[in-house]
Amino acid sequence: MADETQCAGEMGLTAMNLKPIPIVAPVRADAPRNLSSDGQTYHDPGGRFALGNPGRPFGAKGKHNREMLRQVKELAPKAFQKLCSALDNGERWSVEYILDRVLPQSRTVEFEGATAADVKAALQNGDISTAEAKEMSGTLAKLAEISEITEMRNRLSELEKLLQQPGK
């Protein structure tokens, strides 16, 4: 506590000379207005953002965020080296980190063939839960629809070729 007081005293800050910072600074009459690329201004005469201000484009990063991202990218080699050394030392956190990032969130189930009969057999044997069976059945149904659409397109193109041949 004494160190904090000493630091504040060295800086000349006391409860008596602290003044509130104004939230909105006055705008000079000759100050340039924020013109957009289309030449319009989006400020009212008081310098505040006016209605219809498009603001910053979606996905645009401010100066502070760009700088922080650059600094984080510079740390990447050090972080990777630290992770490798932690793995070499057998530290548990490093192993958990790698496994969390590499393995899928849900458990993995391997099938010899991906058919509805395989899913049914796995469900009956208790190898998968009903939720997993439902998800896999939905995926198989979507794949079947895709293959049917592909087959229909092929048949349609064959019919179009037959119709375009003269004399038939």
Image (cartoon, rainbow, N blue to C red):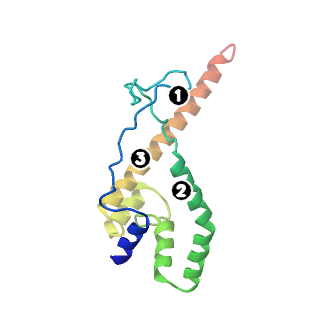
- Looking at the picture, does residue 62 appear above or below residue 15? above
The residue pinned by badge 1 equals: 32
**How far across and down, in percent of the image, does residue 143 sit?**
47, 46
Please, is residue 168 above or below residue 66 in the view?
A: above
The residue type indicated by label 2 comes to Met
Label 1 Cα neighbours within 10 Å, binned few <14 / some 14-19 / many ≥20: few
Mark 2 or mark 1, which is nearer the start of the sequence? 1
Foreground of the two, 81 or 46: 46
Residue type beneath disc 1: Pro
Q: CA distance from mark 1 to mark 3?
A: 61 Å
User: How would you rate the neighbour count of disc 2 (Cα within 10 Å): few for under 14, some for 14-19, many for 20 or more?
Assistant: few
Question: Which of the numbered marks, if any, corresponds to residue 141?
Answer: 3
Instruction: State the residue in front, 37 or 82.
Output: 37
Q: What's the residue at 40%, 34% (across, down)?
A: 26
- Residue positioned 37% across, 62% down in the render: 13
Quarter of the image that includes the N terminus: bottom left
Q: Earlier in the sequence, mark 1 or mark 3?
A: 1
Dot 3: what SS? helix
Q: CA distance from mark 1 to mark 2?
A: 29 Å
Q: Residue furthest top?
A: 167
For the residues labelled 3 and 2, the Cα–Cα distance comes to 46 Å
Residue for badge 2: 68
